């Protein structure tokens, strides 16, 4: 019976006990045998006429000798291991793989003495075949797919080391760099090729083939290159390390995806760490570094347009830094409040756009407003809040003192105690007497603001008034405008409405109506106010400030608001419209009349000529 795996040998198997194999004696015997074999081999070589005395054991010689003998090699043959390995490489190698390159043969000649080299050479041959197989798979795969793949990553390094004329271990880094450069060069060449295509959209290459800008090969490489330029946070892998090509469809999808990620990232950055972005954090850090602030404790409020933070000022602040600068602090060191509120105007959100109208028509900022980028406009908002606070403070209104302004970050006094912000008027628990006091105070403040500071708050309500130490404190004044602002009076009317509605809801008796409050502030009654608004439209280009100046004696006569009610103005404009209509109608009639006259004269003329013709024909 035959074995399915191999032929059963007829020779009896020599039995060796385990103890024998393990014994030292056995090891010695093997060693002696090996020595004897070596000596025998040397004697044989000496008798051979072709043998070179210097290279007696050269691998190639042994190989040729063995080949001449045309014996089937066996690893345990008496001819020795060298011959056996050479037979293996020469005969079997020929059948299964390519012939060994010259470099390997020369290496064999030089290094045949070392077992390690033999092993490496075998490994090298294996690597070479393995790599060939990978390249074949790669070619097959890329034939069918839109996206080119590479298996370079899996190539075995022994191949390059032994089958090419490179010295092992030398210039590895250089090679890698050259390789990388070649990849990018390929991108560059591709780009140049695309750029070289003229406006007509195509070009003939050296072989006379037409190349267009939409050539899939060129576009594929360009897309791959563009992917490499995605933001660093977007993991693209290293597409430059192989001949990557991406179809337009794949590229567009990747681009859309990378953008989606970017929006998320931006949002994350902006909302990270107390709702402030990196640029703001740097400004805050500088405030601490300049010994103005000691620490920033947390958020008091986050609104659509600003984040308010609580901070402690630095007790060691002396008024100047080590360079002798005051760091922009607007008050003497001894007045620096212990607790500060930091208003950070948001730079990433678009809500501030709604506030454009407050600033772009404010003559103080008008020139600077145009053609500015978002960040600069936001800085102007912060600056506007600072100016308005200071102006209000100068007339004795209760507002937080401004400590320092840095770009879009405004530091001011914290209204409250021990980290507890004063409540907004809407949240304050007020007794009837306090409510009445608050009302009186606000009405007086609005009057003062308009008449002395020449400002309209423009967002005055129970939300932007804090109740602290039995008094009202006015905050959030970035949007405040001067009365001459085209919408100044509208804003004032809205403020009056907010305030009166609040006290009405709280049930405070004997208060103004919003019109009365407006009249008290501006000395223009509501009807006059309407008239003034109309008048402003009539007196196009004239300053509304002049037309609505509170002190009537200073107003030039021609610009004094007319004392007529809205209805009168309406009637007046109606009358004007009727007159214009009547005029238009008259014009139309006149035109029609002229048309009729022309028609009549034409008919007459044709009749006359007909008559003339008739006359001519007549004998
Ligand atoms: P927003 O534009 O978001 O309305 P505000 O200036 O009105 O910004 O501030 C929002 C909130 O932050 C206020 O309602 C108030 O509670 C608090 N706040 C603002 N400034 C101060 C301050 N100086 N001291 C104490 N709290 C303040
Ligand atoms: Mg507010």
Image (cartoon, helix red, strand yellow):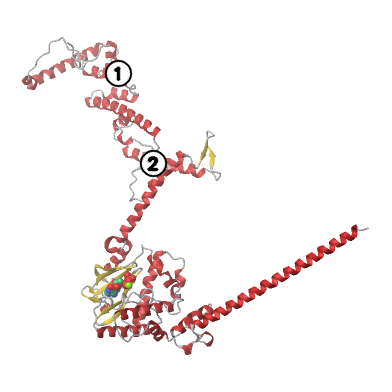
Residue 365 lies in quadrant: bottom left
Can you give x and y, in whole percent of width and height, for residue 380 in the image? 39, 70
Q: Report the image quarter containing ligand 2.
A: bottom left
Q: Residue at x 50, y 45 (%)?
A: 195
Mark 2, other Cα within 10 Å: few <14 / some 14–19 / many ≥20: some
Above or below, comparing residue 379 to residue 51 in the picture: below
Can the viewer see residue 299 in this picture? yes
In the picture as drawn, the residue positioned furthest to the bottom comes out as 553
Can you give x and y, in whole percent of width and height, for residue 300 in the image? 26, 69
> Which residue is tagged 2?
181
Q: CA distance from mark 1 to mark 2?
A: 39 Å
Find out whether the residues at labels 1 and 2 contact each other: C-beta distance under 8 Å. Answer: no
Q: Quadrant of the image for the C terminus?
A: bottom right
Above or below, comparing residue 49 to residue 377 in the picture: above
- Badge 2 marks a residue whose secondary structure is helix
Which mark is on residue 322?
none
Q: Who comes first in sequence, dot 1 or dot 2?
A: 1
Above or below, comparing residue 67 to residue 186 in the picture: above
Q: Quadrant of the image for the N terminus?
A: top left
> Which residue is tagged 1?
90
Viewed as shown, does residue 305 lie left or right of 616? left
């Amino acid at each position: 019976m035959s074995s399915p795996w191999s032929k059963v040998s007829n020779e009896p198997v020599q039995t060796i006990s385990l103890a024998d194999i393990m014994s030292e004696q056995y090891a010695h015997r093997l060693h002696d045998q090996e020595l004897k074999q070596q000596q025998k081999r040397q004697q044989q070589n000496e008798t051979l006429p072709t043998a070179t005395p210097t290279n007696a054991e050269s691998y190639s010689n042994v190989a040729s000798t063995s080949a001449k003998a045309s014996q089937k090699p066996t690893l345990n043959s008496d001819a020795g291991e060298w011959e056996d390995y050479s037979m293996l490489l020469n005969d079997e190698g020929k059948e299964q793989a390519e012939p060994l390159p010259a470099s390997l043969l020369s290496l064999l000649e030089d290094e045949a003495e070392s077992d390690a080299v033999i092993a490496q050479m075998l490994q090298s041959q294996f690597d070479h075949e393995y790599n060939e197989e990978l390249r074949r798979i790669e070619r097959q795969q890329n034939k069918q797919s839109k996206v080119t793949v590479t298996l370079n990553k899996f190539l075995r390094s022994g191949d390059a080391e032994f089958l090419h004329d490179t010295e092992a271990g030398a210039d590895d880094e250089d090679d890698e760099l050259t390789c990388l450069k070649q990849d990018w060069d390929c991108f560059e060449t591709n780009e140049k090729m695309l750029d070289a295509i003229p406006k007509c959209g195509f070009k003939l290459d050296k072989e006379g083939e037409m190349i267009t800008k939409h050539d899939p090969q060129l576009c594929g490489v360009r897309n791959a290159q563009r992917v490499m330029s995605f933001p660093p946070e977007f993991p693209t892998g290293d597409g430059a390390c192989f001949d990557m090509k991406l179809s337009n469809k794949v590229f567009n999808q990747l681009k859309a995806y990378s953008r989606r990620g970017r929006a998320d990232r931006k949002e994350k950055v902006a909302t990270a760490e107390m709702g402030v972005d990196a640029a703001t954090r740097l400004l805050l850090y500088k405030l601490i570094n300049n010994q103005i602030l000691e620490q920033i404790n947390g958020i008091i409020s986050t609104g659509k347009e600003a984040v308010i933070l609580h901070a402690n000022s630095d007790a060691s602040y002396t008024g100047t830094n080590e360079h002798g600068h005051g760091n922009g602090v607007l008050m003497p060191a001894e007045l620096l409040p212990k607790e500060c509120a930091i208003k950070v105007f948001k730079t990433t959100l678009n809500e501030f756009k709604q506030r454009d109208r407050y600033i772009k028509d404010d003559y103080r900022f008008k020139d600077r407003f145009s053609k500015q980028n978002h960040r600069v406009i936001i800085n102007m908002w912060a600056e506007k809040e600072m100016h308005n606070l200071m102006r209000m403070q100068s007339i004795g209104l209760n507002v937080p003192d401004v400590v320092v302004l840095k770009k879009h970050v405004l530091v001011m006094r914290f209204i409250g105690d021990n980290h507890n912000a004063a409540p907004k008027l809407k949240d304050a628990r007020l007794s009837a007497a306090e409510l009445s006091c608050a009302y009186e105070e606000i009405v007086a403040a609005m009057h003062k603001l308009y008449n002395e500071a020449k400002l309209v708050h423009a967002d005055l309500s129970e939300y932007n008034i804090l109740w602290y130490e039995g008094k009202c404190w006015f905050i959030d004044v970035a949007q405040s405008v001067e009365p001459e602002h085209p919408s100044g009076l509208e804003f004032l009317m809205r403020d009056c409405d907010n305030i009166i509605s609040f006290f009405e809801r709280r049930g405070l008796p004997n208060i103004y109506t919003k019109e009365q409050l407006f009249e008290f502030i501006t000395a223009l009654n509501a009807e006059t106010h309407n008239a003034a608004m109309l008048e402003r439209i009539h007196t196009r280009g004239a300053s509304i400030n002049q037309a609505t100046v509170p002190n009537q004696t200073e107003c030039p006569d021609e610009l004094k608001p007319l004392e007529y009610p809205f209805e009168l103005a309406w009637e007046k404009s109606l009358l004007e419209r009727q007159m214009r209509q009547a005029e238009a109608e008259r014009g139309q009639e006149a035109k029609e009349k002229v048309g009729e006259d022309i028609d009549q004269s034409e008919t007459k003329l044709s009749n006359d000529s007909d008559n003339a013709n008739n006359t001519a024909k007549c004998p």
